[in-house]
Amino acid sequence: MKSQSIYSSLLLCILTFSHFLTIAAERCVDFPDPLNLSKQVIVDCPPTANKDVYVKRQTTNFFEVTHNCSATAALCNNIKEAFNDAGKEISKVLKLKQIIKVNATFTDLFDPTLLGAAGSARYLPLTSDDKIIRLYPQPLVKQFSLSVHPEYDDYDIIAFFNTGVDWWFKTDNETIGSDQHDFYLIILHKLIHGLGFISSWSNLLETVVDQDITGLTPIPDFGVSTSIDYTSQLNESVSVETSFDTNLEFITQVKSSSQWEIAESAFISATTNDSSGINHVSEKHYDLTPNFLMTWSQASGETLEYAIQRGGNYSSPIGPRILSILESIGY
Ligand SMILES: *[C@@H]1O[C@H](CO)[C@@H](O)[C@H](O)[C@H]1NC(C)=O
Ligand SMILES: *[C@@H]1O[C@H](CO)[C@@H](O)[C@H](O)[C@H]1NC(C)=O
Ligand SMILES: *[C@@H]1O[C@H](CO)[C@@H](O)[C@H](O)[C@H]1NC(C)=O
Ligand SMILES: *[C@@H]1O[C@H](CO)[C@@H](O)[C@H](O)[C@H]1NC(C)=O
Ligand SMILES: *[C@@H]1O[C@H](CO)[C@@H](O)[C@H](O)[C@H]1NC(C)=O
Ligand SMILES: *[C@@H]1O[C@H](CO)[C@@H](O)[C@H](O)[C@H]1NC(C)=O
Ligand SMILES: CC(=O)N[C@H]1CO[C@H](CO)[C@@H](O)[C@@H]1O
């Protein structure tokens, strides 16, 4: 299946090339707003000696969350508990070495359809064995314990959650309402995105010129995609030093090249036909399996417990394939 081949090459590349990493540049990319990934800030991040302290392997929760919660004390307490449970669950299944700092804001996002978002605060350019520069999410770079690393942001993950959503908490001991969302399920999903479960491939190329989407390509500003084989093939679609008068002219040439097939096959692998691209696993294939956690839509009225049962009662909400993606990324 094409979808599998794109995914596995994305992941294998990272796995294969993360053995030996050096600082590639002193400029990093900050994503201050996980709700709007178009907001990117290039910052200086000079080489910095590692000051991370040793963390005991048996630490039960590697996540240190700074809460900014504008809600009642009872609700804020539920939020803290759910974050604590999510931190413990992820710490149980991943071999983390360093504390991951999360800045979590619980506020009105003025859109009831928006549950929240979390993302790596900074991406750092490192060169791997294959001499390719890639941008790595900060929470992952911390786990590598490099003796010198590009300067970190104060937080590893930035998270926002919407007070405008009707949240359900297990500790309330009530049946979930049809419009309610299980907060614990949502933060587990979002924190896994925050760890770097995202893709730089999107439909931007065609949408900037208002064309129908037929393919996905790496977002140039996002740095070099890890899917180097596909990226370098697509890179050949236009010969070097060709100049174009307009975006449209460039895009037309890319789309008429034989390499556009790669973009088309990436689009067929997309799990939604919007800008979410390939950041999620397919609903169709994984909703009723232990790997449900990273599908795109999270239905209301369903608790995490229900989803686990429906998926076959796996021992963790983080299914084996989701875990293997995280391991391939380098965790
Ligand atoms: C997202 O950020 C970009 C860049 O700062 C901005 O142009 C755009 O309007 C923002 N989008 C939304 C929906 O706020
Ligand atoms: C808490 O979040 C709000 C909304 O984003 C922000 O305006 C405020 O500065 C934050 N407060 C602190 C103490 O970080
Ligand atoms: C956490 O993030 C919020 C929203 O971006 C920001 O207002 C706040 O200053 C941050 N908190 C700290 C302690 O940096
Ligand atoms: C929910 O049930 C547990 C165990 O029976 C109990 O300890 C807890 O106080 C209950 N929570 C609420 C909000 O009633
Ligand atoms: C794309 O091609 C240019 C020109 O040959 C080269 O400098 C660049 O490294 C290539 N990028 C990738 C990702 O292959
Ligand atoms: C999971 O366990 C529940 C309760 O033991 C059981 O009713 C359900 O059939 C199981 N689900 C699957 C898919 O095996
Ligand atoms: C998830 C999904 O609906 N993907 C579809 C997006 O559009 C392409 C092209 O029309 C289809 O092939 C995908 O199945």
Image (cartoon, helix red, strand yellow):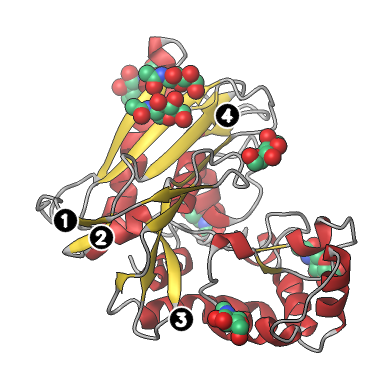
- Ligand 4 visible in quadrant: top left
* Quarter of image, res 123: bottom left
Badge 3 local density, few (<14 within 10 Å), some, or many (20+)?
some
Please name the residue shown 29% across and 55% down the image. Answer: 46
Query: What amino acid does circle 1 point to?
Result: Asn
Q: Earlier in the sequence, mark 1 or mark 2?
A: 1
Q: Are marks 1 and 4 in contact (CB under 8 Å)?
A: no
Disc 3 versus disc 1: nearer the observer: 1
Q: Earlier in the sequence, mark 2 or mark 4?
A: 2
Disc 4 versus disc 3: nearer the observer: 3
Badge 4 local density, few (<14 within 10 Å), some, or many (20+)?
some
Q: Earlier in the sequence, mark 1 or mark 4?
A: 1
Numbered circle sitting on residue 50: 1
The alpha-carbon separation of the residues under discs 1 and 4 comes to 46 Å
Query: What amino acid does circle 4 point to?
Result: Ile
Q: Earlier in the sequence, mark 2 or mark 3?
A: 3
> Residue 148 appears at what percent x and percent y?
20, 62
Disc 2 versus disc 4: nearer the observer: 2
User: What residue is disc 2 on?
Assistant: 149
Indicate the secondary structure of the residue bearing disc 2.
strand
Indicate the secondary structure of the residue bearing disc 4.
loop
Query: What amino acid does circle 3 point to?
Result: Leu
Numbered circle sitting on residue 118: none
Is residue 79 something one can see in this rendering? no
Badge 2 local density, few (<14 within 10 Å), some, or many (20+)?
many
Numbered circle sitting on residue 12: 3
Disc 1 versus disc 4: nearer the observer: 1
